Image: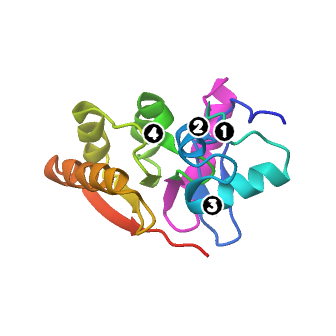
Amino acid sequence: MRNYQNVLTVDVNEKGVLDVDTVKGCTAGMKARPGTGCYGGCYAAKIANYRGIDFSNAVTRTIHSKSQARAIERKVSAAPQGFFRIGVMGDPCHAWEETVSVIEWLSDFAHPVLITKHWRAATDNQLKRMAACGTALNTSLSALDTSAELKHRKAQFFRFKLLGGNSVARIVSCD
């Protein structure tokens, strides 16, 4: 199995949604549910496995050149639906500071939407910075979460809301 590359990229999926994943992979989710990822049905883990990528190794993705940064800005400026999403093929909680920096940078070009299970909690300062950028922070919750996971995720949902953020509860289900 190979690892994801550490270069930040922008992709438009089949639904026309622009993805800017600051992290690919999910070490914490795979540790909590070895082999299959969350709830035994993590689509991102399945796709990574199919492609021969080690999803259990969360890789932080960054900018490596000015030309790469300009290309990303152009793509985000042209986001088909006016927003970009972080947290598609990995959980950004594995690199909060890098994720917040990308949100601060790209929020001038499109609306940031972040999806996380909060395996690792962001600091109040990081949450305030995301709120200042108008980030819609989607906290993934599920009836399949353990009691401790659900309690933690609900607490993170309310933390962001109390700090002035647009906090969204994203209900996750699977077969």
Reading the image, the residue beneath label 4 is: 93
Q: Position of residue 138 (x, y in %)?
A: 38, 59
Residue 25 point in image, percent of width and height: 64, 42
Position of the C terminus, as image quadrant, is bottom right
- The residue positioned farthest toward the bottom in the image shown: 175
Q: CA distance from mark 1 to mark 4?
A: 14 Å
Q: State the mark number for residue 40.
A: 3
Mark 2 Cα shell of 10 Å, populated few (<14), some (14-19), many (≥20):
many
Between the C-alphas of marks 1 and 2, the distance is 4 Å
Q: Which residue is mark 2?
A: 27
Side of 153 where 17 appears, left or right:
right
Which of pointers 1 and 4 indicates the residue nearer the eye? 1
Q: Residues within 10 Å of mark 1 (few under 14, many from 20)?
A: many
Residue type at numbered disc 2: Thr
Q: CA distance from mark 3 to mark 4?
A: 20 Å
**Amino acid type shown at disc 1:** Ser
Report the mark closest to the observer, 3 or 4.
3
